[in-house]
Amino acid sequence: MAEKTKPKTRRSLVIVESPTKEKTISRFLDAGFIVKSSFGHVRDLPKDELGVDDKGDFAAKYVPVERARKILAELNALAKNADTVYLATDPDREGEAISWHLREMLKGAGVPFKRISFHEITKTAIAEALKTPRDLDMALVNAQQARRIIDRLVGYKLSPLLWSKIKSGLSAGRVQSVAVRLIAERAKEIAAFREEDYYTLSTKLAKAPAAGEKSEYRDFDSKLVRWEGAAVEATVLLKLFAEDYRYKTSVFKKTEDTVEAATYLRGSTLTVSKVDAKAVRQKPKPPFITSTLQQDAYNKLGFSSDRTMKVAQSLYEGVEMGGDRSGLITYMRTDSFNVSAEMQKEAAQFITEIYGKEFCPAKPPLYLKKVKGAQEAHEAIHPTSAYKRPEEVNKFLNSDQEKLYDLIWRRFMASQMEEAVFDSLSVEFSDEKGRAVLRTSGRTVKFEGYLKIYMEEKEEEVAGEDEEGSAVLPPLKEGDKVLLKDVTSKSHKTSSPPNYNEASLIKTLEKHGIGRPSTYAAIIRNIVDRGYINREKDRKLLITRLGALVTEKLKDFFKEIMEISYTASIEDKLDDIAEGTMDWVKMMKDFYGPFSQDLATAERDMVRSHPNVIKTDEKCPLCLSPMVQRESRFGKYLSCSRFPKCKGKMPLDKDGNKQDYFAPIKTGKICDKCTKNAMLLRKSARGYFLACSGFPKCRNIDPVTPEEAEAIISANKK
């Protein structure tokens, strides 16, 4: 009798979207599971057509992503042999949509699909997620669908308009166009600002010694704050496009204006008129969310938003640490300040053990939701364990990971610690007639609290003030006499609103609810790559002529889309869809009706324009034709007016001045590759070289020694 073959054991299939997550999670699960990566999105709208039924109910035509065809076949084969498919993509709307697309592509396998989500990639988190699987949340999927379809409609409808009215290759986007407008409006505000000079008076004071006593106290500084009953300095409020801007000025507009007050002070007796001493408590900042992580990494580490997110992704997905592999931080795309009770308990235990009981608050800190539309099921960005100290895991990290993890760990641990306490002292001095009031103030750290591990720049200055002497005052009480040692006038200039950098742009986008945490890095990358803004060496984001032109055109014909409040209202509606309180098709119809009318008007009435090309008196080094100034995403440059027939080009610095340029010199040598064109002496950053004059058809290059180059240059001068 033939032996019965045992039925093949069916294993569960866990699908993630990242090969790094696949590698990490595989370590946590036993032989009953197969973990496989989808390598990101598997379906999307087609590239060569709109792919959306804009005449009906906005049904989307999804097609497999080209690179996903092979992996889909593999996933389908694995799903057919599985008892359950667990969809374990990221815990946000985009992750939910990826899971939905996977289910739609694999549902022919005939097995049940379950959704699991987790905010950190650790063994405990994965085990807990598998205990509580759920169905797909179609409200989240529809919110992501609505975002994708709106962005497709705006991009695929506006971009061809810009091609026909300005130049080919341009693009427009619902969020990116508003981001460009912020930078364009700031350029106008800076240009319109009128800088003014103003002056203040500073003094050097000393406590007057008692009779027969020699003073042992150091001199200290103070400032004239009131003169003849009026405040010396005033704060001016300037209403800008996206925010209010405040700057200081003074009643002393010229240095001569200070003479009377300075002369009067030199001849006056000053007395302490007010002493205000108090303890000031300062709360730690909440743990990071995506936007604040990007801002702090930019300001403290010099990381671009794109770089920050890539490094954070690697810390989240898992790092190899001496035979162990797990995630070091929680999910990095979040807008919630929530922290789990378990993590807060662990942090409190760590703080008590390492720093002492006095550094641990009696109750875990609670940070209220301040970000509009924050998804409270999410958690803030924090280490997966308080005990994974930076100094202990750094040896397993690369330089970028080390810096960012240290920042995240310290910010989170500080957020769970006691407040810092400062001794604050403010002293005012008046003359006998009450014409002048001077003030000096300072504060010193009384109890470090969270400053033990995390300080902002201003807090570092406060902590070190006693070394400078600015915050160290002699014992003073009302009625004490002080001696005026010196009085000096200081010149200042009113400061214009600052240019945006990545951190301040992200802060403004977040403040107005424009976009979502996962989109900020992509927004900035896109508008730089499209040539709408330049990223300067000093990290400023400056509008280009092309960016300004596109912004003005879109403002004229698409007022709603270009408004901050409207863009934010779209995000609110997407939140409503995600919460199941709004139908996504109705939302699409409400959006697309007015938009299509504006589009028709723009196609009819928008005047064709070209990005400004500035004529110059410079001659082309190749053909001696006039050159024009142009601008690309790499900066300003001079180009031959006969381009593309002539490729003559000269670099310019950021102020539009010519940089050192070496005009190619024709030599008597014929190219040995094409055998018909003369070789030219050229110069690059690495030195001189010979290149065929038939470039780009012939790309032959020959090395040349410095001596040979000098000989050719000398012969050319003769």
Image (spheres, grey):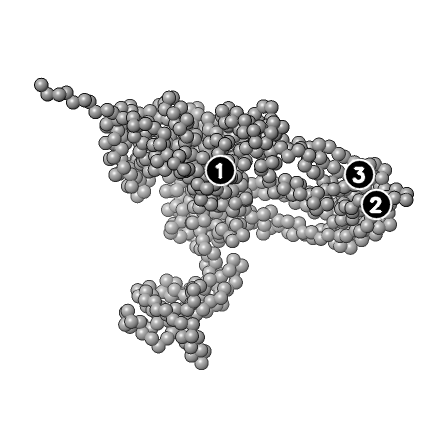
Whether residue 499 can be seen here: yes
Q: CA distance from mark 2 to mark 1?
A: 51 Å
Q: How would you rate the neighbour count of disc 2 (Cα within 10 Å): few for under 14, some for 14-19, many for 20 or more? A: few
Position of residue 390 measured from the top left corner of the image (x, y, whole percent):
50, 38
Looking at numbered disc 1 in the image, what kind of residue is underneath it?
A: Glu
Check disc 3 and report the residue beneath it.
475
Question: Residue at horizontal 39%, vertical 34%?
Answer: 324
Position of residue 663 measured from the top left corner of the image (x, y, whole percent):
43, 70
- Considering only order in the chain, which callout, 2 or 3, is on the residue closer to the N terminus? 2
Q: Quadrant of residue 430?
A: top right
Would you say 73 lies left or right of 273 here?
Answer: left
Looking at numbered disc 2 in the image, what kind of residue is underneath it?
A: Ser
Check disc 2 and report the residue beneath it.
215
Position of residue 421 measured from the top left corner of the image (x, y, whole percent):
67, 33
Check disc 1 and report the residue beneath it.
392
694, above or below 52, in the image: below
Would you say 304 lies left or right of 422 here?
Answer: left
Q: CA distance from mark 3 to mark 2?
A: 12 Å
Work out which quarter of the rendered image holds the C terminus and state it. bottom left
- Considering only order in the chain, which callout, 3 or 1, is on the residue closer to the N terminus? 1
Q: CA distance from mark 1 to mark 3?
A: 46 Å
Question: Residue at horizontal 40%, vertical 28%?
Answer: 123
Would you say 507 lies left or right of 680 here?
Answer: right
239, above or below 92, in the image: below
- Comparing 80 with 497, the one in front is 80
Looking at numbered disc 3 in the image, what kind of residue is underneath it?
A: Pro
- Considering only order in the chain, which callout, 1 or 2, is on the residue closer to the N terminus? 2
Farthest residue, direction top = 1
